[in-house]
Amino acid sequence: MFQVYNYIGKESIVMSYITFQEVRKTYHVGEIDIHALDGVNFEVEKGQVVIVAGASGAGKSTILNILGGMDTVTSGKVIVDGKHVDAMNEKELTDYRRFDIGFVFQFYNLVQNLTALENVELASEICKDPLDPATVLEQVGLQDRMHNFPAQLSGGEQQMLAMGRALMAKPKILLLDEPSMGLSPLLVKEIFRIIEEINKQGTTILLVEQNAKMALAIADRAYVLETGKITLEGSGQELAASEQVQKVYLGG
């Protein structure tokens, strides 16, 4: 049954593939302190699909940026496969981002003057042992669009291309920031089908979503984030059945 979130103890840190322990992130804007994360605790087991749901401004993207090595914690611990990401130096963070993490950003960040194939090939240049670009594009359903430029692709196709680019380095963890944003229901369904296929190949996936219905359907574990705090946790099925979650996030 879903529950109000409880503190994660040391035993969980040993067992879990990804652990956030009492993570706080404060941004200083002039004389104002903005507490984006306020004592966040959560776990992800290897091979799981985990969703963090919450309204805009809840702190979801901050979690991804910290886990992706693109932002630092104010306090707390972030442990991935036994490595303390919160204590890494710049070289260690660079290697971590390059070899362990695939990141699909909210706004794709595609190179507009390169074709789909060239965008994916560009990612292969910084990989130790990259996948075949054409094979990756086939995996994300773009085998017939590889010579098109991003501007010639639909929003859903651009999202698929961004996912393909992130997969080139065979990341252990794939992070997705609002993958369904702005897409039609049909394209959202296709995006989540691809996410499931990627997960079946062994990739651990953490995604943040404001529209949680489709994400909860494929999630092994789910967390609800409100104003920087985890307030609910449970399996995807448990949270999808919760009246509170249905009312706030599923339009129930």
Image: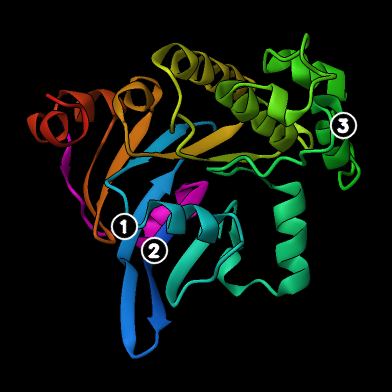
**What residue lies at 40% left-to-right and 83% top-to-bottom?**
28
**What residue lies at 75% left-to-right and 62% top-to-bottom?**
94
* Residue occupying the far left of the picture: 243
For the N terminus, give its image quadrant: top left
Q: In the image, which residues are magenta?
A: 2-19
Q: Quadrant of residue 113?
A: top right
User: Which mark, by number, is residue 225?
Assistant: none
Relative vertical location of residue 10 with respect to residue 167 in this rendering, above or below: below
Q: Earlier in the sequence, mark 3 or mark 2?
A: 2
**What residue lies at 55% left-to-right and 70% top-to-bottom?**
86
| Callout 2 secondary element | strand
Q: Quadrant of residue 224?
A: top left
User: Which mark, by number, is residue 118?
Assistant: 3
**What residue lies at 88% left-to-right and 24% top-to-bottom?**
132
Q: Which residue is mark 2?
A: 21
User: Residue 20 location in percent, x, y?
Assistant: 42, 59
Q: Is residue 20 visible?
A: yes
- Residue 7 located within the stretch drawn in magenta: yes
In this rendering, the label closer to the viewer, 3 or 2: 3
Q: Amino acid at mark 2?
A: Gln
User: Residue 126 location in percent, x, y?
Assistant: 87, 48
Q: Amino acid at mark 1?
A: Ile
For the C terminus, give its image quadrant: top left
Give the Cα distance between marks 3 and 2.
Answer: 39 Å
Q: Is residue 40 left or right of residue 90?
A: left
In this rendering, the label closer to the viewer, 2 or 1: 2
Q: Earlier in the sequence, mark 1 or mark 3?
A: 1
- Contact between marks 2 and 1 (CB within 8 A): the answer is yes
